[in-house]
């Protein structure tokens, strides 16, 4: 993507100096990052709904639908439907911790993909010189 193209399609996510999404800031940032934001949910249903929205917003490409379904199934394992069951603060905190770990796995994969993209892009630039 060239600079003109990047200007035409501004990213809603913070960018690194290399021009890729700063996934560390997206997930862990203080403005707030996704993990901190989701951690403010007070009920299992809200926690699950927030995490589901995050997954759906992160995986928006046409070929991401299978990944979205897999991740939502993974969320079911972290936060099962409680059907109005009253949970203790400890149980909700455990769910928050589970969601945080789940999101950090996604973050780590996104960081890895960004590094691979930069490596390929830089190798392409080196070949053109």
Image (cartoon, helix red, strand yellow):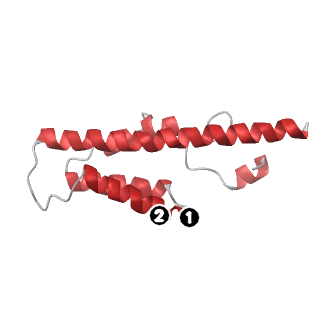
129 left or right of 119 in image: right
Where's residue 9, x and y in %? 67, 55
Give 68 or 26, whichever is nearer the viewer: 68
Question: Tag 2: Cα neighbours inside 10 Å, few (<14), some, or many (≥20)?
Answer: few
- Answer yes or no: is residue 88 visible: yes
- Mark 2 and mark 1: Cα distance apart in space: 7 Å
User: How many marks do you count on the picture?
Assistant: 2
Q: Position of residue 18 (x, y in %)?
A: 68, 35
Residue 33 visible from this viewpoint: no
Residue 38 in the image: state x and y as whole percent. Answer: 33, 45
What residue is pinned by disc 2?
66
**Helix, strand or loop under label 2:** helix
Q: Which mark is residue 63?
A: 1
Residue 90 sits above or below residue 86 on the image: above
Q: Quadrant of the C terminus?
A: top right
The picture places residue 22, in percent across and down from the top left corner, at 56, 38
Q: In front here: 106 or 37? A: 106
């Amino acid at each position: 993507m060239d600079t003109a193209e990047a200007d035409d399609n501004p990213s809603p996510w913070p960018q690194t100096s290399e021009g890729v999404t700063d996934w560390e800031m997206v997930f862990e940032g203080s403005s707030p990052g996704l993990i901190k934001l989701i951690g403010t949910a007070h009920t299992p249903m809200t926690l699950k709904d927030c995490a589901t929205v995050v997954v759906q917003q992160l995986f928006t490409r046409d070929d991401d639908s299978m990944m979205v379904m897999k991740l939502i199934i993974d969320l079911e394992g972290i936060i099962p439907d409680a059907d109005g069951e009253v949970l203790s603060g400890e149980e909700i905190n455990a769910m928050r911790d589970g969601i945080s770990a789940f999101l950090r796995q996604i973050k780590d994969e996104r960081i890895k993909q960004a590094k691979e993209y930069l490596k390929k892009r830089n190798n392409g630039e080196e070949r053109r010189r």
